[in-house]
Image (cartoon, grey):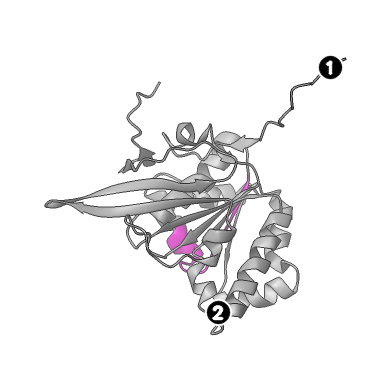
Amino acid sequence: MAENKRPKIVPQLRRVQAGIPGLDRLVEGGLVENSLVVLRGDTGTGKTIFALQFIYEGITKYNAPGLYLSFNEDKEATYAHGMEFGWDFRKLEEDGKFAFIHYEPHEVVRVMEEGGGTIRDQLEAIRARRLVVDPITPFTMVFNDPYKENEAIMELFSMFRNWNCTALIISDARASLTGGEKTERAVVLADAVINMYYTREGPSRARMLEVLKMKDTAHTERLIPFVFTSGGLEVHDGKQRK
């Protein structure tokens, strides 16, 4: 007698909407919840605006508190940058939905030794669901030994995963349209990688992004143009908005 075979049940992944108009439909409805996403691109591509929008929209539209860990700009400069798009992070901080931490890269080594220290405490205090690291590149430059750098990145990413947040990790490494660039450890370890470009087309320039990889996601493999509007970044995926 033939054995009855039951169809294999694949658990449905939980996804979070990035808050970037046009992007979610390109990645099966959103980023995988609690994944580590590396956002990579050269200076001027719009990585910080993407990250601020990811945090702000998460709080204001999806009730997902967020923490911004900066190795670059201080709080006042970041808040001023956000206000250019009408994003009032100071108000969100006063409401207990947002936290900003500025560290020098070498200070994070001590924080890691403490199991997260202030970062972990702030995440727990606001019950953060989103985390931004902007950028991770200075942290990697603390280590003169490539082996120690790789070990530190692995440890840092492991710490992020324990915090149950969807993490957006900015890298200043230039992504090449033709490939051949050195693959960073962060790119290898990440669940997803989004590249941002600011390319020259004749006498002008154009901004584009691509989803290089995204685990457990049937994502677009095309280069997608995007623009900046008064409300932030918007992806032009060629489909009409409702």
Residue occupying image coordinates x 45% and y 59%: 78
Residue occupying image coordinates x 68% and y 68%: 155
Image side of residue 142 versus residue 182, left or right = right
Answer whether residue 132 is visible to the viewer in this image: yes
Snapshot quadrant of residue 152: bottom right
The amino acid marked with disc number 1 is Ala
Residue 146: numbered disc: 2
Residue 40: numbered disc: none
Q: Is residue 69 above or below residue 152?
A: above
Residue occupying image coordinates x 84% and y 16%: 2
Residue 129 is situated, as x and y percent measured from the top left of the image, at 65, 46
Q: Is residue 102 above or below residue 202?
A: below
Q: Which residues are magenta?
A: 65-78
The amino acid marked with disc number 2 is Pro
Q: Is 221 covered by the magenta stretch?
A: no
Residue farthest to the bottom?
A: 144
234 or 87: nearer the viewer? 234
Answer whether residue 106 is visible to the viewer in this image: no
Q: Is residue 176 above or below residue 85?
A: below
Residue farthest to the left?
A: 203
Q: Is 67 covered by the magenta stretch?
A: yes
Residue occupying image coordinates x 70% and y 62%: 159
Residue 57 is situated, as x and y percent measured from the top left of the image, at 51, 40
Residue 14 is situated, as x and y percent measured from the top left of the image, at 66, 35
Residue farthest to the front?
A: 1
Q: Which residue has dot 1 on it?
A: 2
- Location of the C terminus by quadrant is top left
